[in-house]
Image: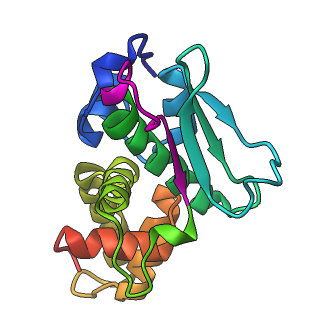
Amino acid sequence: MNKITELQSIKNIEPYNLLKTLGITQAPVDVFEIAKSIGANVDQSYDFEKLSFSGEVFLNQDHKPVIWVNPIDSTNRQRFTMAHELAHLVNDIIPNIGKENENNKFHVTSNSLKRDGRQESIEFRANEFAAQLLMPAEFISVEASKIINTYKSIHGEKSKIPKDDFITQISEVFEVSNQAMTIRLTRLGII
């Protein structure tokens, strides 16, 4: 994996371009290695004051990114949280480096979701970035073809894989939850 030495070079970068810059070409995407490759300090400590939320990203006193991910969350949840926090880093923190404000810290909490299911726009954008980073359309296309071809080779050329089986298998390849994959496949118009 390539390294990024200048944070400003990834300011507002699109997920696919970040993957391309880092030389990542297949699933599953290792978001923890991405964080390290951009010089972020990855923290998974048991900070009891933070255990009520999933993640946090901020710049330390040396202006180096620190990303904390809740160590008691499931592995898939931690991966999505890391991708989400990377989104805040590239879209919300790096563009504001040097500006005099307190926007250098972001938390992902259950309060980010309103009771009616809508999200704050900044959180929605971070979730979209995370989904695109973990489940790039190009990678999904490749892996979906493999899964479908394997199924047809076993069950016959005219057979169709059940949707739930397909979602489970492709979720396992990408190391994401079935729910996250279902949302991504729906947004891509695949299911």
| Quadrant in the picture for residue 179 | bottom left
Q: Is residue 108 left or right of residue 98?
A: right
Q: Is residue 72 above or below residue 34?
A: below
Q: Is residue 51 left or right of residue 176?
A: right
The answer to whether residue 106 is magenta is yes
Relative image position of residue 90 (x, y in whole percent): 35, 34
Outermost residue on the front side: it is 100
Q: Residue at x 50, y 22 (%)?
A: 37
Q: Residue at x 28, y 61 (%)?
A: 121
Q: Of residues 102 and 157, which is closer to you in this image?
A: 102
Relative image position of residue 118 (x, y in whole percent): 33, 78
Relative image position of residue 13 (x, y in whole percent): 25, 33
Q: Is residue 185 above or below residue 60?
A: below
**Number of numbered discs:** 0
The answer to whether residue 137 is magenta is no
Q: Residue at x 50, y 56 (%)?
A: 80
Judging from the image, the colouring scheme is rainbow
Q: Is residue 153 visible?
A: no
Relative image position of residue 186 (x, y in whole percent): 25, 76
What's drawn in magenta, residue-wise? 95-108
Q: Is residue 13 left or right of residue 175?
A: left
| Quadrant in the picture for residue 65 | top right
Q: Residue at x 54, y 34 (%)?
A: 58
Q: Is residue 79 left or right of residue 69?
A: left
